[in-house]
Image (tube, helix red, strand yellow):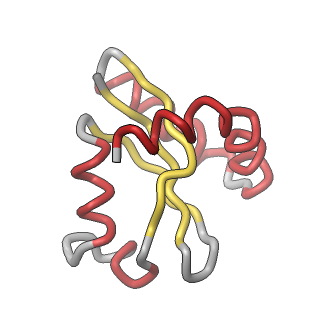
């Protein structure tokens, strides 16, 4: 299972979009010292994710979201998916 995910900084409410096969480990990396960009804005929390069968599907979706370059688009995704993905994300953590 692979994931396309959106995390939000609790410092400045900024978003980060990525993909990974281990969502829990990746969140720990974002909140640790392993990531140059996200380590400056931690702590982060998962606000949205989608599951995919393959890495290439998750990667493609990540780039689709990033290509929009729109905070409004990301917030609409989160709003639409918050009831299901928020619950599932809390279970993962």
Q: How many marks?
A: 0
What residue is rendered at 45% in x and 44% in y?
A: 90
Task: In this rendered view, identify the residue nearer to me: 17 or 9.
Answer: 9
What residue is rendered at 31% in x and 43% in y?
A: 23
Q: Residue 44: x, y in percent?
A: 45, 67
Which residue ends up furthest to the top in the rendered image? Answer: 53
> From what the image shows, is residue 3 above or below residue 31?
above
Q: Residue 38: x, y in percent?
A: 39, 72
Res 60 → quadrant = top left
> From what the image shows, is residue 45 above or below residue 86?
below
* Position of residue 22 in the picture relative to residue 6 (left or right): left
* Position of residue 20 in the picture relative to residue 77 (left or right): left
Res 15 → quadrant = bottom right
* Position of residue 91 in the picture relative to residue 68 (left or right): left
What residue is rendered at 44% in x and 37% in y?
A: 4
Q: Residue 19: x, y in percent?
A: 37, 41
What residue is rendered at 33% in x and 24% in y?
A: 56
> From what the image shows, is residue 54 above or below residue 22?
above
* Position of residue 50 in the picture relative to residue 15 (left or right): left
Q: Residue 12: x, y in percent?
A: 61, 80
> From what the image shows, is residue 47 above or below residue 35?
above
Res 86 → quadrant = top right
Image quarter (top left, top right, bottom left or bottom right) of the N terminus = top left
């Amino acid at each position: 299972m692979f994931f396309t995910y959106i995390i939000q900084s609790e410092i400045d409410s900024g978003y980060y979009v990525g993909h990974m096969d281990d969502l829990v480990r990746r969140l720990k990396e974002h909140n640790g010292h392993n990531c140059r960009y996200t380590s400056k804005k931690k702590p982060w929390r998962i606000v949205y994710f989608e599951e995919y069968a393959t890495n290439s599907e998750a990667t493609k979706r990540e780039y689709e979201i990033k290509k929009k370059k729109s905070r409004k688009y990301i917030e609409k995704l989160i709003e639409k998916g918050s009831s299901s993905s928020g619950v599932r994300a809390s279970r993962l953590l």
